[in-house]
Image (cartoon, rainbow, N blue to C red):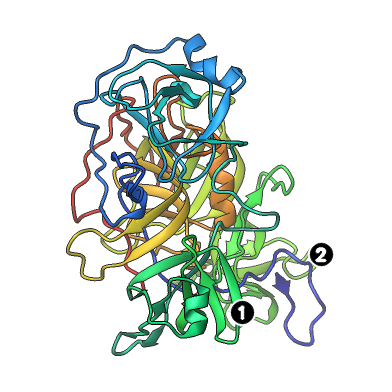
Amino acid sequence: MLRSPRGAPASRVCGFRPLVVAAALTGCSAPPGELLEAPESVPAASDVSIPASSTVEPAATKEPAPTAADRDTAASATPIGHRITKSGAIVYAAPHRRAERRGRTEARRPFAIYSMEPGDGCEGDWARVDKGGFVCLEYGSVSKGPAQIQPELADGQMLPFIYARPKILDRKTGAIAKVPRYQDRYALVRGDPPLDFLEPDRQYTFVRTKTRRAGLMLIDAEERATPARDMKIAAPSLFAGRDLASEPVADDLRPAWAVGRPAVLRERPDPAARQVGVVDYHAALEIDPAPILVGEESWYAVPDGGGPGAKAYVVAADMNYWIPGPALAEARADEVWIDVELGQQTLAVMRGQSPEFITLISSGAGGTGTPLGLFRIYEKLAISPMRSGPNAEDPYYVDGVPWVQYFHRRYALHASYWHDDFGKRRSHGCINLSPKDAARVYTLTAPEVPPGWNSLREHTGEPGTLVRVRRGADAVADRRLPLGVIEEGQEGQEEPENQE
């Protein structure tokens, strides 16, 4: 929000003041093992602490390329019913377990089936599902449905869970609270011995709270109860980017956001000049992108920043703005694709050569930068855990990260509910988005994850959305791989970010 200094006339409103996050950490990991085989009697691979491989699936037999009619069969047909599995079911490209693995249904959520098919390696029936896929119903049970897009959010809900971690008691010594977990809320109230204790370096997910004489309790999906007094509950960022259809920007200006706390507007590009306003953190405005160099410091002009018709000036370091990139010849005129610019920490949803939505990100910091290049989204996950790699100096586990989109090895676009530093580098390579922005971008990209599914890989007939990662207006190398090929990650190099 643009504010006048105390005693000065009020200026126009340009944004809002977001809630500063309460818990700070970063997270990025290889795709979890949600496509690893897991019987329904045990937790899904996405729920266990096994690091995932991002290699090409071994021993998968290549299926004949489906025709357009084949691809549309399930999408155009009426489901014959719905099924549900305890741990989520692997979706194969053909009715046998040697086939390419296409995705996974969500645990304990209904998914649509369209026909029963003969096949090998399944004690039950094979069912044809969306995306030309097949699921073994050996551990499936009948559900009334309907299938819902994952993650499911109630009206007004921004994230699928309540997120919390054990409190850091002393930052100097690194002491972290020892937090008990009980079998259920009744056991906690009775004072029964705890079931176990929470790991100190982990963000946990909870589905609701309860207040009893024992105080506020956090309840997880397994009905286990954790006392909230020694937990740090995340307060996710409320930041959201700019829709250019509803908030257009003049051709000679650039959309920008304040990243100073706050950003001060002055009458002239001079630190000693009179202050004429203040721009709240993450508030949106427009700037003239031509830098004004005064000594060793650069400034930008803000039209109407000092009032109608009066320019104001802001230090460049306090402002991030969108820099248009070179035309992308690979993009069709109506094709949606993602353009990430690391210098100013922005992401644009493009249609053809025109931006439709622009926002701030947080990319890789220090020696773990985000790779430059032209990529495709090769896998999308509605919800995924993220964890540090083996032998990490600061091990951690982050539960329930929503709207994850992998585009290269361990690198992904995903929501970050643990910080509000969008516009600044702070990850170990992944592209962090605010929850609102991550949800929006996820709905616009391919492959499109069907209702009731947690994940989907790109496949013949549905390649992933293009993602260009650049710095400034420089061209980048085309690093796309053949459809269905995932480049093997280098263990220990592109690990997730450390948490604070």
Q: Residue at x 41, y 12 (%)?
A: 66
Splitting the image into 4 quarters, where does residue 103 fall? top left
Quadrant into which the N terminus falls: bottom right
Splitting the image into 4 quarters, where does residue 157 fall? bottom right
Q: Is residue 22 left or right of residue 425?
A: right
Q: What residue would you read off at disc 2?
A: 308
Q: Is residue 28 visible?
A: no
Residue contact between numbered discs 1 and 2, judged by CB atoms under 8 Å? no
Q: What crowding class fits label 1: few (fewer than 14 Cα within 10 Å), some (14-19), or many (20 or more)?
A: few
Per the image, label 2 sits on a secondary structure element best described as loop
Q: Residue at x 37, y 84 (%)?
A: 177
Coordinates of residue 301 in the picture (x, y in percent): 63, 63
Q: CA distance from mark 1 to mark 2?
A: 52 Å
Observer-nearest of 315 and 211: 211
- Vertical relation: 425 (above or below) 407: below
Coordinates of residue 63 in the picture (x, y in percent): 31, 15
Q: What residue would you read off at disc 1?
A: 211
